[in-house]
Amino acid sequence: MDLPQIVDLRQSPTALRVQRGVMRLLRGQHDFCCFAEVPLANGRRADVLAVGPKGEIWIVEIKSSLIDFQVDAKWHHYKDFCDRFYFAKPPELDPDIFPESEGLIVADAHDAAILRQAVEDPLPGARRKALTLKLARLGADRIHTLMDPNEM
């Protein structure tokens, strides 16, 4: 698989494949616009942050292996920045390692499927507004970087 034009090189090849499948699912079946690697106000970085046609915000945390899941104690902090929170995993990773209380997606480089729907927990209005403004600026900045990579 070719690397996407916007990548920070911290993701494993497996995580990049899962990311691609997740973003294809959310865009193709749910009409969401997706951002990869989004810095949040709490210092965390969301693997995939998606904005739906009605302004709903989902965060997807990608776990590429059992060890990746076991060493991660930060995933709880993403839930303050979305209406729905999901884990995403490659097909070979056992789904039983993930908390039953959280949404779950299985993905490869070509497609994905929601195995378990996430509980909806609507964001407060002020946080939604701040995050929406941040995403608009982030999207515009990423387009600018693609159009003029030598500027800055």
Image (spheres, rainbow, N blue to C red):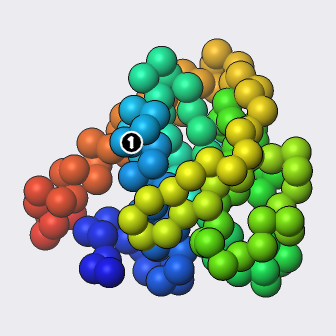
In this rendering, the answer to whether 126 lies above or below 141 is: above
In this rendering, the answer to whether 136 lies above or below 41 is: above
In this rendering, the answer to whether 121 lies above or below 113 is: above
Q: Quadrant of residue 109?
A: bottom left
Residue at x 28% of width, y 48% of height: 141
Residue in the foreground of this view, choosing between 102 and 83: 102
Please give left or right for residue 11 compared with residue 82 in the image: left
Q: Quadrant of residue 111?
A: bottom left
Is residue 84 shown to the viewer in this render? Answer: yes
Residue at x 19% of width, y 51% of height: 144
Quarter of the image for the C terminus: give it.
bottom left
Residue at x 30% of width, y 70% of height: 4
Please give left or right for residue 47 compared with residue 72 in the image: left
Is residue 36 shown to the viewer in this render? Answer: no
Residue in the foreground of this view, choosing between 112 and 118: 112
Please give left or right for residue 100 compared with residue 67 in the image: right
For label 1, the crowd category at 10 Å Cα-Cα, with few meaning under 14, some 14 to 19 and many 20 or more, is some
Q: Position of residue 88 (x, y in %)?
A: 64, 60
Q: Quadrant of residue 125?
A: top right
Residue at x 86% of width, y 65% of height: 96
Residue in the foreground of this view, choosing between 152 and 44: 44
In this rendering, the answer to whether 34 lies above or below 17 is: above
Residue type for callout 1? Arg
**What SS does tag 1 mark?**
helix
Residue in the foreground of this view, choosing between 14 and 82: 14
What residue would you read off at disc 1?
27
Q: Position of residue 81 (x, y in %)?
A: 67, 38
Q: Position of residue 124 (x, y in %)?
A: 71, 19
Quarter of the image for the N terminus: give it.
bottom left
> How many marks on residues?
1
